[in-house]
Image (spheres, rainbow, N blue to C red):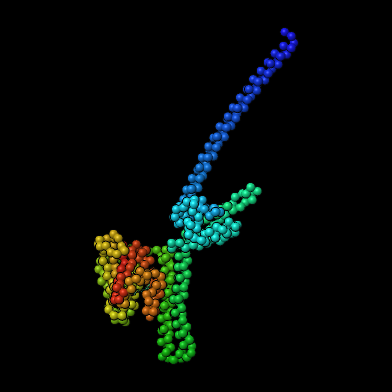
Amino acid sequence: MNNAWVVIIVFLIMVIIAQVVFYRRLKAKLRQAEASTARFNRLLALTRKKLAEVQTRRKKLLAASTQALVIVENDYSISSANKMAKRLFGPVDKTITLTQWTRQHQLRELVDQTLQNQKVPPIYLSRDEKMLEVHARAIRSHTPDGRKVPVAVALAIHDVTELHRLTRARRDFVANISHELRSPVASLQLLVDTLRSGALEDPQMAPNLLDKMVAQLDTLNQLAQELLDLSLIESGQSPLRMSAFLLRDIAQAQIEHLLPQAHRKNLALSNEIDPDLRALVDETMIGRVITNLIHNGIKFTESGSVTISAQKLNGRLIPHEKSREDWVLVSVADTGVGIPPDESTRIFERFYKVDRARSRKQSGTGLGLSIARHIVEGHGGRIWAESNGKTGSIFYFTLPPDE
Ligand code: ADP
């Protein structure tokens, strides 16, 4: 064998060795690649699972939100709307636009302004007797040249009906107080002016005018006291102290105070409550309710009587009350001017007076029945009035029995 052959054989052996080594390395690399692919697949599966979880949670969060949440794209299509939004505006699909869906043009203006990068204050919409407050925020995305531009708008819609009602009630309340204050203050002013311009020296007129001033001061005092009571009762700062009491005794104590007024108008005032009838009540508070009802009976009756009676319901069903079989039903009946049927529930509202001109002749704040309603409802009972609107009214309220 010559040298050339030896070289060739050695070369071939080296090539084979090199291939074996290369092949082994390739195999190791392949195994490594397989392992990292498997790792990557596991990571991918985990990420997908987490993404799905996040999406489910997001959906649940959107569904649980008490606000209506909507995403409007820049072509005004709706890409997302939660349950509350669908409840407000009905079902939605990809083909419908914001205005077609909501029938509210102001919403489109709000979306336009928000897409134009403007900071827009919330707007208010009224829909189906609801007051809605709508907030808008732009959703931005990166353009290929790296800028961030608004591409959609998120709308958050709150139902602020209750808040709106409370604000209006507060405004009305202040207006009503001012109205109630104006008349006694104006009368006092007039009386003081009359006294100053000489009546003070008149021995006959002066005491008369002073009596009138005292009456106006009483009205102001009553207003202040009733406002304070109402606010204490409404805010729950006047807890009821319940005990078993004989109703006839509570009523009699109030009647004693009111007898002089009834006699002045020649009205008969009678207590027809069974002497053994007990109820579980706060004595002072129920005393106030009875006083208010009898006092009103006297005020709004020119001739006849005011009568208080009470009995156990004993299974009898009565309007407004269900299955309160062993409760006590108290009634105060008068033979007065009556209450128009459509006003018989409104008189329990704060400051409400039937026919202000008629009521003006009588002193009164319009708060008494509202306080009475709070007290009776605080006992778990109900209070209502019945009248044919012409002659006489009957006020009823229910109270818990003593067991
Ligand atoms: P007021 O201080 O004006 O009496 P209330 O809240 O006690 O306030 O009563 C509200 C209104 O209900 C009265 O102003 C009156 O118009 C009407 N009202 C209450 N009781 C009677 C009654 N027995 N007969 C006729 N109207 C009544």
**Extreme residue in the top direction:** 1
Q: Residue at x 31, y 65 (%)?
A: 398
Q: Please count the marks in the image.
A: 0
- For residue 23, above or below residue 330: above
Q: Position of residue 230 (x, y in %)?
A: 42, 68
Q: Residue at x 57, y 30 (%)?
A: 35
Q: Position of residue 54 (x, y in %)?
A: 51, 44
- For residue 207, above or below residue 108: below
Residue placed most toward the observer, 9 or 362: 9
Q: Position of residue 322 (x, y in %)?
A: 30, 60
**Extreme residue in the front direction:** 95
Question: What is the quadrant of the C terminus in the image?
Answer: bottom left
Question: Can you tell which quarter of the image residue 34 is in?
Answer: top right
Query: Is residue 309 among what the camera can see?
Result: yes
Question: What is the quadrant of the N terminus in the image?
Answer: top right
Query: Is residue 288 among what the camera can see?
Result: no
Residue placed most toward the observer, 28 or 397: 28
Residue placed most toward the observer, 273 or 134: 134
Q: Quadrant of ligand 1?
A: bottom left
Residue placed most toward the observer, 346 or 27: 27
Q: Residue at x 54, y 35 (%)?
A: 42
Q: Residue at x 39, y 77 (%)?
A: 356
Q: In the image, is 321 to the left or to the right of 197? A: left
- For residue 188, above or below residue 42: below
- For residue 44, above or below residue 165: above
Q: Position of residue 285 (x, y in %)?
A: 36, 68
Q: In the image, is 262 to the left or to the right of 124? A: left
Question: Can you tell which quarter of the image residue 267 is in?
Answer: bottom left
